[in-house]
Image (cartoon, helix red, strand yellow):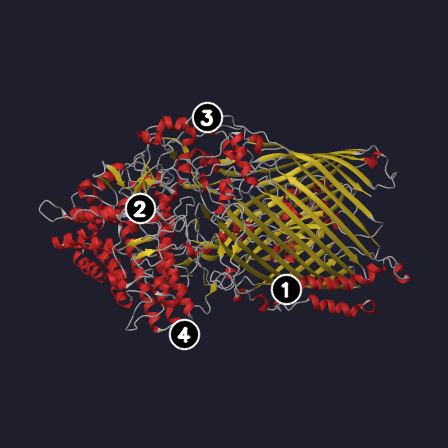
């Protein structure tokens, strides 16, 4: 049975099915079908073989979809970018402007605190491409990494593979019942991407191309004189003679032109670069069998550090209606992503797992920086992802009986080859190779039957089955010090008789293979009652079994239901103004999946011999050893499914023939019984024990408006507005074991408080003299920081509990890293063949913790530690933030005055951005519509993106923040771009 | 072919059914039973020879992690009040100066005892479950006895190591496997140490002098886990290792009669474990004492990091703190994190001792600095301590700064000096001097002749300071010395108030409210 699911077998089967279905019909095209068939009015249209339960009125789709003009005339590379600010309730994080790097999508807030990359993975919405849930890079690879800045491998955003010109619509599914019909994969919401499909009709060719450039950002570059002046007040005020002796070498000599010379590195780091796309699609065929072919190439470049991504896409779609009642559709799409990554030292060292001496940073001077960059000429940093998706779907419609079936797959592989020469790592070279893939096979079938009860009443019943099999695998190998920079591969001894057979020659490679499999089997049944299209009531029951759950808790049964009531039909049938008024309510319970297979077996033994920064050592005296998972945490038996209870009540109002469409949704989402590693008494050796019982509530409102203020009319003027807004608030409802609060590293979770709050000390200034430090009247001891008395030059932290000791008990929860309010608004103004549109995007009530400022101000500890956080990038010589507004504390103090977890580093990061401004000119319209026989449409457009930002944030861009609200200044700028493009339909 | 298809297309319903069959899959439970490839399940574990071996290696590996993490072995034992000073790192400076409650992340991390309790839990679990492996015929009774003895000895070692750092620690002798994580209180340190002592006394007879060694009585497994004596060396705890721990426990408690018995036993039976005193060249050679493997039996108790086994690391070695570029050994790091100031070096290695091969000034050659065995860059402001310098498997280049030196807990020289200390404390001056001079002469310095003007205890501790520099003993030596002498008021105060112990990390107390901070650090 098992090999039934290997990709090869699936492909074989698909091919077979394709041949069976298409052979007679595609071949028959030229001869035309027989006469009887020609008379049929049936037309082959695409089916993706899946049914999403939807009870809302039609324009619900429009309200929750990205507007078409935003998709196909903007130079965005990823799906996340296309979504950003365009649909109510969707929050997209773009932590770096580096093209093709990781971005995150959250729908209706986060269901668990983003404690690590695993949680980040588990909290994001699922993306469906024509109904196939896309398989993403599983975070299990982080287990072998010293640092989790980037996942090993190409770490390319797999959602950068979706070409906007291939997309028909992007809809965000938030309705609980609809999500329940999709199952556990969609528990965090679903992004439903539908590609353009084949359709009947005369052959159509569309061509879209743009060319443009991204602009160099305006930055203030600085040299050592600036840094020297910045440090001077600290030295003047607090330094001892010994501290002065240890003044950093690179700042010591002001005649050193390398550091004190011109800071013109920016000429080499920031560049105007081009960005372009070309795509072509061809649609054709007959009514009964049609096809679409799509090919595209896109080059998307960043403006910093020579980053970019190159995408090649080829897609092929066929729809066939072999007989009247049967529809067969298939898709095959291939994408290749080649990414040119940044040259950050930190990211490179993280991969190299070696910290060289970091005393002397790169120089701000162009000539020296350029010789450093030249060394990358010898380096290799290839990052390729190949992504193939495909399906064959069948939909049969035999009067009242319907059948839908599909076999689909998503296979994506990542390949990364690196080589860095000896000049980049203090005389050592480094080579690594990564090959990993994620493979998902989905097989689903559903049958439906409709009963006509008379009196305008209908009941339809549906039963479905879904099976999903995932494989995530990678092989990673790295090695140091090949014999010289020209030898970049591991050579093994090839003599089978030699004792060194297959032993690497010249250097020792470290090899890490890992594989994880998981499966999900689901059965569902739906019953829908409808009365005269006025009232629809639907109920759904489903049973899901996951291989990642323990055998006694493998299956989860859940019920959902919803109703839609057309109020207009009932009450306002003859109202001239209200064209749509409907009320919709649905409730669903959806099981949530575990994305790691380590829980399925209960208590377990793992390799756990590593320590901080040496996580991969797996043997002692050369013998492998295992133990309980002390570092990862105890896993016991009896882990139940966690689930999400979601309720949504929505009102859709259409006014003036739906010229004004308004959607108002109120939702409440309770994610319950979630698994969390809870710290246990350390005397049992574990960092924590996994326990279920965390519950998080998200509640909020979505408002969407689409208004044709001036509909297109004879005078040629038209004006449309769109706006969306979401307010979301999360609250921790429960912790495992009835705990009321929990401390997990630098995070504190308190029941009743938000899960995304920062846990910080309150800072009230500075003690200017020792005498100002309060003294405990009972013990006569000075106020201390965890036992270390405070002195002049230390921060005035609030002693919340009044025990004269500043410690964790004096930290408070403040702020939130997931914005409470997000949204966007835009407008399209048209006059005859011209149209102008703009689009704003905002996120309000959001804070970030400014680690950048903290580590710049804490330069003494940052530099002395010589660890990964001490790395100075070339952007060290960029003034990202004015640090003079912070108090001058004693940086040598044992209380670490510039520690990041205090509220002076908590910044308001609300912002409003003008994301795009676009001008379109329809040439055919200009030539008077319908006059051209060759062109169906010919549109020229000019689009500018990322035009301005309004924010009170002190750093460079409030968006360039890590997923957990930490601003570390590492994000590459999101570029401003300007493109000119053409969209032609023949 | 076409005919077949045409035939089929006339009978659509039939092959629709066929297609359905292809699509539909028996989504039975069996399909959902997948075994994880990166962990071992509970079911069926502790039934084989391999399970026992991997569990045994597991607790040794955890112990290595406990002492290697953040170079804690040296931060606990070498830095506080020791000879090293920090060049510029404020966190190390705080440790050196004994400001152990300073809130640097490093100090937070090394005051957390969880890693030791992981060792203890792994040992407890091993002791409870290992008998299951007897089901495997290859796992004989002699394996079982030996492995249990090791688990008990390692657990005792972990307790002793912890008591030296934190004083009272919770004593846990069962694994409580199954997820009951009681919040225990701290146990009196003497109770913990006497438990450790009893365990070691019980384990010692079941431990061999050598693993896979010559064993005419056939008490121990021959070819233990398929590895020869030369592979095992003294890596697992031997009988003498158990006695070494017993001697140290007794010394820590001031029971010098017992120390003399245990240490004397080791000294007299050293050759049975192939232990010997090493000459100074072996001591400091990149392929010498501190590099495990290659017939090196001299690490009586040590944790190794062997390059060919892929156990090279950057942390877990004093080199990470002490090495820097020198003329003889260029590295990219220009200044070390810690160093021994020149004044201290001169004081520790007085010329009155004669020509000390470890460091000294050769008066015969125009007062030139002659011995750079322990230090290089002596002419610079910051000398580099290079006694232990095993870079990249003992290569003679400092270019690739990864290390393979073992963490040596004790070796024969250390035991001899401890023996001397006990004899001196018991007033057996001549014998004490003999042991001391044995070590001294091996380093080329003059013998100490006992006499009214000679303070033998001082001489022994001064020798320990020289010989064991950089091996994580200095702080514990100071404690024992001051307990013996009680002539330093400040230090006596530390001893009396519990200031010789480290504070307990906030994270420990957060997860167990019954743990009370050491009074001195409250």
Q: Which residue is mark 1?
A: A5
Q: Are marks 4 and 3 on the same chain?
A: no
- Frontmost residue, A680 versus B140: B140
* Location of residue A72 in the rendering, given as x and y in whole percent from the top left corner: 72, 42
Q: Residue A493, relative to residue B318: is it above or below?
A: below
* Location of residue B58 in the rendering, given as x and y in whole percent from the top left corner: 39, 61
Q: Residues within 10 Å of mark 4 (few under 14, many from 20)?
A: few
User: Distance from label 4 to label 2 (Cα)?
Assistant: 48 Å
- Frontmost residue, B492 versus B350: B350
Q: Which residue is mark 4?
A: B135
User: Distance from label 2 to label 3 (Cα)?
Assistant: 40 Å
- Frontmost residue, A47 versus B87: B87
A878 left or right of A741?
Answer: right
Q: Which residue is mark 3?
A: A225
Q: Are marks 2 and 3 on the same chain?
A: no
Front disc: 2 or 3: 2
Q: Which residue is mark 2?
A: B387
Front disc: 4 or 3: 3
User: Distance from label 4 to label 3 (Cα)?
Assistant: 73 Å
Q: Quadrant of residue B141?
A: bottom left
* Location of residue A514 in the rendering, given as x and y in whole percent from the top left corner: 53, 58
Q: Are marks 3 and 1 on the same chain?
A: yes
Front disc: 4 or 2: 2
User: Distance from label 2 to label 1 (Cα)?
Assistant: 59 Å
């Amino acid at each position: 049975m098992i090999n039934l699911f290997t990709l090869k077998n699936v492909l074989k089967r698909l091919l077979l099915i394709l041949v069976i279905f298409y052979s007679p019909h595609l071949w028959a095209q030229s001869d035309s079908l027989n006469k009887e068939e020609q008379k049929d009015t049936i037309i082959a249209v695409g089916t993706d073989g899946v049914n999403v339960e939807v009870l809302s009125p039609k324009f619900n789709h429009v309200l929750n979809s990205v507007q078409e003009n935003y998709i196909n005339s903007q130079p965005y590379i990823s799906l996340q970018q296309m979504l950003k600010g365009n649909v109510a309730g969707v929050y997209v994080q773009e932590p770096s402007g580096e093209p093709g790097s990781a971005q995150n999508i959250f729908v209706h807030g986060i269901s668990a605190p983003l404690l690590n990359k695993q949680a980040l993975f588990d909290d994001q919405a699922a993306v469906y491409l024509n109904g196939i849930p896309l398989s993403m890079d599983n975070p299990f690879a982080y287990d072998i990494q010293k640092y989790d800045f980037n996942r090993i491998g190409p770490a390319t955003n797999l959602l950068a593979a979706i070409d906007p010109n291939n997309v028909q619509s992007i809809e965000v599914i938030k309705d609980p019942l609809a999500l329940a019909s999709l199952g556990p994969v969609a528990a965090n919401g679903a992004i439903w991407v539908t590609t353009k499909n084949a359709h009947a009709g005369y052959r159509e060719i569309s061509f879209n191309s743009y060319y443009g450039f991204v602009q160099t950002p305006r930055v203030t570059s600085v040299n050592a004189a600036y840094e020297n002046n910045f440090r001077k007040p600290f030295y003047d005020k607090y330094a001892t003679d010994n501290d002065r002796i240890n003044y950093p070498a690179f700042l010591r000599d002001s005649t050193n032109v390398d550091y004190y010379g011109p800071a013109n590195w920016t000429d080499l780091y920031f560049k105007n670069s081009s960005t372009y796309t070309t795509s072509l699609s061809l649609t054709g065929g007959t009514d009964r069998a049609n096809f679409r072919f799509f090919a595209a190439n896109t080059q998307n470049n960043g403006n910093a550090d020579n980053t970019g991504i190159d995408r090649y896409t080829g897609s092929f779609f066929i729809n066939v209606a072999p007989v009247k009642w049967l529809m067969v559709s298939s898709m095959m799409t291939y994408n290749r992503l080649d990414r040119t990554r940044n040259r950050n030292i930190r990211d490179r060292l993280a991969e190299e797992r070696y910290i060289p001496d970091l005393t002397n940073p790169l120089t701000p001077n162009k000539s020296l920086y350029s010789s450093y960059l030249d060394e990358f000429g010898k380096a290799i940093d290839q990052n390729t992802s190949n992504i193939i998706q495909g399906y064959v779907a069948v939909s049969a419609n035999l009067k009242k009986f319907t059948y839908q079936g599909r076999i689909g797959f998503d296979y994506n592989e990542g390949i990364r080859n690196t080589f860095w020469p000896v000049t980049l790592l203090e005389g050592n070279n480094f080579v690594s190779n990564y090959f990993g893939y994620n493979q998902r096979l989905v097989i689903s079938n559903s049958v439906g039957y409709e009963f006509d009860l008379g009196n305008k009443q209908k009941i339809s019943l549906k039963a479905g089955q879904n099976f999903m099999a995932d494989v995530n695998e990678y092989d990673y190998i790295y090695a140091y010090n090949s014999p010289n920079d020209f030898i970049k591969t591991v050579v093994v001894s090839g003599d089978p008789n030699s004792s060194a057979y297959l032993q690497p020659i010249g250097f020792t490679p470290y090899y890490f293979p890992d594989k994880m499999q998981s499966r999900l089997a689901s059965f569902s049944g739906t019953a829908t009652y409808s009365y005269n299209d006025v009232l629809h009531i639907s109920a759904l029951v489903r049973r899901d079994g996951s291989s990642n759950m323990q055998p006694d808790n493998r299956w989860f049964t859940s019920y959902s239901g919803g109703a839609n009531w057309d109020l207009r039909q009932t009450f306002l049938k003859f109202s001239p103004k209200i064209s749509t008024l409907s009320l919709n309510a649905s409730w669903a319970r959806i099981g949530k999946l575990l994305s790691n297979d380590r829980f399925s077996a209960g208590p377990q033994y793992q390799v756990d011999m590593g320590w901080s920064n040496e996580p991969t050592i797996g043997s002692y005296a050369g013998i492998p050893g295992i133990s309980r998972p002390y570092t990862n945490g105890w896993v016991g038996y009896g882990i139940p499914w966690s689930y999400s209870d979601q309720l949504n009540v929505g009102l859709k109002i259409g006014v003036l023939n739906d010229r004004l469409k308004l959607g108002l949704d109120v939702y409440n989402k309770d994610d319950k019984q979630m698994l969390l590693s809870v710290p246990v008494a350390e005397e049992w050796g574990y960092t924590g024990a996994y326990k279920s019982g965390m519950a998080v509530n998200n509640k909020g409102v979505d408002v969407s408006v689409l208004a044709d203020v001036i509909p297109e009319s004879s005078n040629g003027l038209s004006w449309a507005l769109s706006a969306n807004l979401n307010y979301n608030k999360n609250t921790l409802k429960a912790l495992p074991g009835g705990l009321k609060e929990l401390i997990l590293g630098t995070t504190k979770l308190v029941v009743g408080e938000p899960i995304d709050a920062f846990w910080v000390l309150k800072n009230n200034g500075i003690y200017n003299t020792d005498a100002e430090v309060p003294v405990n009247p009972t013990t006569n001891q000075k106020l201390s920081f965890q036992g270390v008395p405070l002195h002049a030059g230390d921060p005035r932290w609030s002693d919340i509990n009044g025990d004269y000791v500043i410690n964790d008990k004096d930290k408070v929860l403040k702020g939130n890293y997931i914005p409470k309010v997000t949204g966007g608004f835009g407008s399209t103004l048209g006059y005859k063949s011209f149209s102008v549109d703009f689009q704003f995007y905002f996120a309000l009530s959001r804070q970030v913790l400014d680690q950048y400022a903290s580590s710049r101000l804490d330069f003494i500890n940052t530099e002395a530690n010589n660890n990964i956080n001490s790395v100075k990038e070339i952007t060290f010589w960029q003034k990202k933030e004015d640090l003079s507004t912070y108090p001058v504390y004693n940086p040598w103090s044992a209380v670490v005055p510039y520690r990041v977890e205090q509220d002076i580093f908590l910044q308001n990061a609300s912002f409003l951005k003008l994301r795009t401004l676009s001008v379109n000119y329809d040439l055919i319209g200009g030539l008077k519509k319908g006059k051209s026989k060759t062109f169906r449409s010919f549109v020229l457009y000019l689009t500018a993106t990322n035009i301005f930002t309004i924010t009170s944030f002190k750093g460079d861009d409030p968006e360039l923040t890590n997923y957990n609200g930490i601003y570390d200044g590492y994000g590459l700028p999101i570029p401003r771009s300007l493109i000119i493009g053409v969209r032609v339909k023949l | 072919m076409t005919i077949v298809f045409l035939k089929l297309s006339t009978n659509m319903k039939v092959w629709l059914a066929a297609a359905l069959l292809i699509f539909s899959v028996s989504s039975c439970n069996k399909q959902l039973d997948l075994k994880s490839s990166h962990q071992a399940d509970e079911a069926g574990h502790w039934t084989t020879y391999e399970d026992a071996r991997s569990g045994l290696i597991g607790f040794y590996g955890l112990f290595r992690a406990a002492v290697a993490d953040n170079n804690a072995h040296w931060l606990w034992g070498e830095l506080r009040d020791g000879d090293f000073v920090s060049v510029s790192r404020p966190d190390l400076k705080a440790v050196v100066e004994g400001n152990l409650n300073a809130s640097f992340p490093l100090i937070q991390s090394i005051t957390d005892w969880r890693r030791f309790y992981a060792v203890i839990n792994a040992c407890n679990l091993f002791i409870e479950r290992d008998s299951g492996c007897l089901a495997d015929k290859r796992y004989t009774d002699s394996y079982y006895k030996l492995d249990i003895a090791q688990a008990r000895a390692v657990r005792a070692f972990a307790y002793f190591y912890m008591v030296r750092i934190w004083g009272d620690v919770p004593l846990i002798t069962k694994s409580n496997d199954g997820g009951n994580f009681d919040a225990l209180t701290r146990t009196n340190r003497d109770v913990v140490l006497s438990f450790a002592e009893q365990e070691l006394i019980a384990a010692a007879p079941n431990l061999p002098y050598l693993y896979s060694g010559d064993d005419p009585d056939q008490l121990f497994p021959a070819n233990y886990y398929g590895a020869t004596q030369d592979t095992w060396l003294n890596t697992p705890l031997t009988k003498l290792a158990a006695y070494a721990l017993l001697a140290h426990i007794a010394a820590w408690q001031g029971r010098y009669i017992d120390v003399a018995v245990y240490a004397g036993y080791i000294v007299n039976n050293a050759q049975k474990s192939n232990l010997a005193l090493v000459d100074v060249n072996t001591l400091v050679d990149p392929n010498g004492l501190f590099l495990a493997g290659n017939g090196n039996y001299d690490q009586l108790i040590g944790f190794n990091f062997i390059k060919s086994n892929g156990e090279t690391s950057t942390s877990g070695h004093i080199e990470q703190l002490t090495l820097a570029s020198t003329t003889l050994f260029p590295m990219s790091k220009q200044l070390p994190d810690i160093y021994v100031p020149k004044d201290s070096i001169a004081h520790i290695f007085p010329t009155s001792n004669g020509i000390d091969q470890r460091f000294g000034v050769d008066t015969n050659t125009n007062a030139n600095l002659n011995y750079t065995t322990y230090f290089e860059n002596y002419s610079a402001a910051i000398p580099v301590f290079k006694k232990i310098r095993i870079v990249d498997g003992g290569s003679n280049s400092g270019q690739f700064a990864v290390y393979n030196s073992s963490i040596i807990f004790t070796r024969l020289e250390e035991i001899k000096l401890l023996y001397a200390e006990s004899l001196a404390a018991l007033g057996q001056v001549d014998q004490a001097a003999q042991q001391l001079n044995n070590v001294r002469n091996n380093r080329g310095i003059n013998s100490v002749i006992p006499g009214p003007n000679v303070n033998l205890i001082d001489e022994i501790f001064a020798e320990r300071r020289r010989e064991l520099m950089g091996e994580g003993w200095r702080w514990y030596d100071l404690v024992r010395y001051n307990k013996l002498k009680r002539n330093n008021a400040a230090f006596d105060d530390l001893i009396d108030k519990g200031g010789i112990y480290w504070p307990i990390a906030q994270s420990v107390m957060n997860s167990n409210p019954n743990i009370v901070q050491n009074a001195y650090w409250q």
